[in-house]
Image (tube, grey):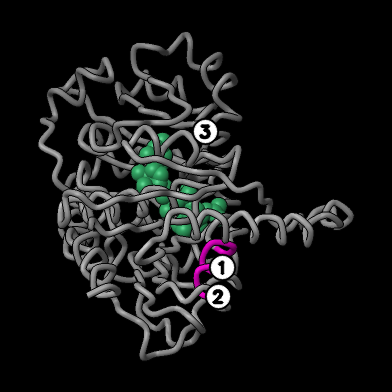
Amino acid sequence: MPHKVIIAGGGTGGHIFPAIAIANALRKAEQDIDILFVGATGKMEMEKVPQAGYKIEGLEIVGFNRSNIFKNILLPFKLIRSLFKAKAILKRFQPDAVVGVGGYASFPILKAAQRLGIPTLIQEQNSYAGKSNKILARNAAKICVGYDGMEKFFPADKIVYTGNPVRSNISQSSVSKADAMTHFGLDVNKPTVFAVGGSLGAKSINESLQPLLAEFVNRDVQLIWQTGKLYYDTAKAASSQYASHVKVFDFINVMDFAYKAADVVVSRAGALAIAELCVVKKPTIFVPYPFAAEDHQTANAMSLVSKHAALLVKDDAARTTLGNELFSLVNNKALREQLETNIAALGNTNADVVIAKEVQKLWS
Ligand SMILES: CC(=O)N[C@H]1[C@@H](OP(=O)(O)OP(=O)(O)OC[C@H]2O[C@@H](n3ccc(=O)[nH]c3=O)[C@H](O)[C@@H]2O)O[C@H](CO)[C@@H](O)[C@@H]1O
């Protein structure tokens, strides 16, 4: 009988893409393995997981609304309903193990699995653990972490330091710089900046870049600009007269091409963005999202900045200083080379395989 695994979680790319990386590594290790994803209806995973070739079921679950607490009245009922549905999925699919990657659907599925005695594994991407993972950790078999020092949050005997799993189409990408530039309609001989605001886009990065578009053209520097859905139309309109140098996308499906094309990257400091930038070895300016829980993006970025492996511009300073920082890095070959060498030393290309082995241990 082939083994069966449920992978649960999502909400944003930082949870979905490590989940897909783990699934791919499991499928490589056991070709006939049966993998089912469980996500939250209406969230990004319902589109990205099938695109990656896996089946997914959705739970109707929402997060706690911090801005309007009255909107949380139905939350306990929704949670109970999703726990029932989670239990029904588990009873029908009969998985040998359940993996939780964080985000909405993780909690009900792992909680229900633990009640049914099915072994669970948590993959925690961040240097700061959220409440749900802390609760689930009590009855989890293993917790695979991307950062050191996680004993603060989880039982030490269950923690395995693996690093964060980077999708193999990024870590093993064979695309050439010339092909990547052609893909984006750019000139291979001109310096190129790739700006990415995490999986949803970043307001401060977008608003910092918009007034700089003419300068990109004047300096003959090209820009691949990932905006997220919300800012896409504004950015597209603002860049129409600079289209020779500025290419705008709401979301990039071929991240390996964008990384390959870039001489300099401007990025939010989500855990997966960091893991990927270390693997693709790019000189990066981080603009951490300052309102992530416990300001963990700043902590993520600082772990590189303190090793001279990246630069940092604070979110509230981006509109005034990002332009200077990025154009001076484009012009400073020595600094780019130093950042490249230092960030490369932090790359981890086999976390997906190591985590897949930990999952397999749950049934062997
Ligand atoms: C605002 C917030 O709380 N963000 C969190 C969220 O970030 P977010 O979802 O932005 O996650 P990350 O930056 O960690 O990862 C983004 C992922 O999406 C992919 N990608 C991104 C843009 C794009 O156009 N195409 C694409 O494929 C990247 O290659 C990467 O795999 O989850 C991370 C991991 O739990 C956390 O560290 C972040 O703090």
Query: Residue 323 at what x, y percent from top left?
Result: 45, 38
Q: Cβ–Cβ below 8 Å for labels 2 and 1?
A: yes
The quadrant in which residue 190 appears is top left
The residue indicated by pointer 2 is: 115
Q: Specify which label sits upstream in the sequence, 3 or 1.
A: 1
In this rendering, position of residue 243 left or right of residue 340: right
In this rendering, position of residue 272 left or right of residue 64: left
Question: Does 110 lie within the magenta span?
Answer: yes
Q: Main secondary structure of the magenta part?
A: helix
Question: Does 312 lie within the magenta span?
Answer: no
In this rendering, position of residue 222 left or right of residue 335: right
Query: Residue 176 at what x, y percent from top left?
Result: 10, 30
Q: Nearer the viewer, residue 323 or 158?
A: 158
The residue indicated by pointer 3 is: 228
The residue indicated by pointer 1 is: 112
Helix, strand or loop at mark 1: helix
